[in-house]
């Protein structure tokens, strides 16, 4: 259903996600891989800063409304976005959106429905990004915890929800807890991963004049001013990653446990590097060698009974 060229494209636009998805069972791998490619394509459109914000907003709204059916107007918008990208994987991604959508139309109808739902959420989050941070006339910062929670749900929590609903249909039973509980854990898992990204990028965002962390006054690049807010949301991220660890312990398919354990461990590792607000310009990332070590731990968590409690418990 997905040709080798699209798998290579997935590898090119992702680092850690490709390491997880390649090991997924075939019954869920196509929907998750295609969902990622389409979400990454819409994210590339949202970030194509050489295009005016209003133009990007128009293309995203068109894509969200027409998903799975691309009219000539949207084709022109996608072509324009692709031409603004430098040669590389992101440009190839935008040039092949229609091919990816054609693959998505071959999925079972239930999978298509879930894909439409999650992509609608993701693109709504990207649209809000442009409206709040590029087109707003007032302070460019989220104003309340509710706005931040909405954002991390739309762009990542909804992905955990999508993944879990897909798996609940593919396996009976999928988890050792009831369906409602595992969907909640999956949603919080996704929110935790996105909140780690928000915290990691906070200094750079403030330098650009915006903040995803809720701010009611003027933005400040003074780390001491930001520390209480940063620490508060670091605690929220830790709580959500604990939900991710619970998710891994609760699910049954070994290969899915591996695919979920790896991002949990990467998220925990990244959060551990941010005891305080990172200085501007300091790139917080997990090294490739460390990721290979976390892959080994993920394999142990997935395959060895009782290892999940030991490894994840020691990390958290």
Image (cartoon, rainbow, N blue to C red):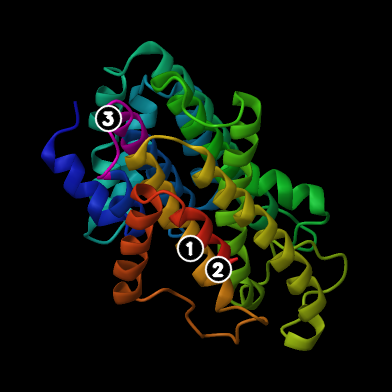
Along the line of sight, the residue nearer the viewer: 161 or 301? 301
Q: Can residue 97 be seen in the rendering of this structure? A: yes
Q: Is residue 148 left or right of residue 64?
A: right
> Which mark is drawn over residue 314?
2
Q: Secondary structure at mark 3?
A: helix
Task: Name above or below for residue 285 compared with residue 238.
Answer: below
In the picture provided, is 56 more to the left or to the right than 223? left
Q: Residue at x 37, y 19 (%)?
A: 69
Residue at image location 56% in from the left, 33% down from the top? 161
- Up the image or down, 259 lies above or below 226; here it is above
**Residue depicted at 26% across the width and 17% down the height:** 106
Q: In 3D space, how far apart are the residues under numbered discs 2 and 3 (Cα atoms)? A: 45 Å
* Res 311 label: 1
Crowdedness of circle 2 by 10 Å Cα count: few (<14), some, many (20+)?
few
The residue that label 3 is drawn on is 98
Mark 1 to mark 3 CA distance (whole Å): 42 Å
The reply to whether the magenta stretch includes residue 29 is yes
Q: Which residues are magenta?
A: 22-33
Residue 260: percent from the left, percent from the top?
Answer: 43, 47
Q: Nearer the viewer, residue 85 or 185?
A: 185
Q: Look at the picture and state if 142 lies above or below 102.
A: below
Secondary structure found at label 1: helix
Tell me whether circle 1 and circle 2 mark residues in contact (CB < 8 Å).
yes
């Amino acid at each position: 259903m997905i040709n080798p060229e699209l798998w290579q494209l997935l590898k090119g636009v992702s680092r850690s996600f490709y390491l997880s998805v390649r090991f997924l069972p075939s019954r869920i791998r196509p929907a998750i891989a295609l969902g990622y490619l389409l979400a990454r394509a819409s994210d590339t459109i949202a970030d194509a800063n050489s295009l005016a914000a209003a133009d990007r907003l128009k293309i995203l709204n068109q894509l969200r409304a027409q998903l799975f059916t691309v009219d000539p107007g949207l084709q022109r918008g996608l072509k324009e976005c692709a031409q603004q990208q430098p040669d590389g994987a992101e440009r190839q991604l935008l040039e092949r959106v229609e091919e990816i959508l054609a693959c998505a139309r071959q999925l079972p109808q239930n999978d298509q429905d879930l894909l439409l739902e999650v992509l609608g959420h993701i693109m709504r989050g990207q649209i809000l990004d442009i409206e709040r941070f590029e087109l707003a006339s007032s302070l460019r910062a989220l104003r309340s915890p509710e706005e931040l929670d909405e954002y991390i749900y739309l762009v990542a929590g909804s992905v955990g929800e999508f993944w879990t609903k897909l798996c609940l249909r593919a396996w009976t039973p999928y988890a050792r807890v009831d369906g409602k509980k595992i969907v909640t854990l999956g949603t919080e898992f996704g929110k935790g991963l996105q909140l780690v990204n928000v915290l990691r990028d906070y200094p750079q965002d403030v330098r650009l004049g915006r903040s995803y962390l809720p701010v009611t006054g003027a933005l400040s690049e003074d780390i001491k001013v930001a520390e209480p807010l940063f620490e508060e949301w670091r605690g929220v991220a830790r709580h959500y990653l604990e939900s991710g660890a619970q998710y891994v312990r609760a699910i049954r398919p070994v290969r899915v446990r591996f695919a979920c354990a790896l991002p949990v461990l990467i998220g925990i590792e990244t959060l551990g590097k941010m005891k305080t607000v990172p200085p501007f310009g300091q790139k917080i990332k997990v090294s490739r060698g460390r990721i290979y070590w976390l892959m080994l731990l993920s394999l142990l968590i997935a395959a060895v009974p009782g290892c999940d409690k030991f490894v994840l418990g020691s990390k958290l």
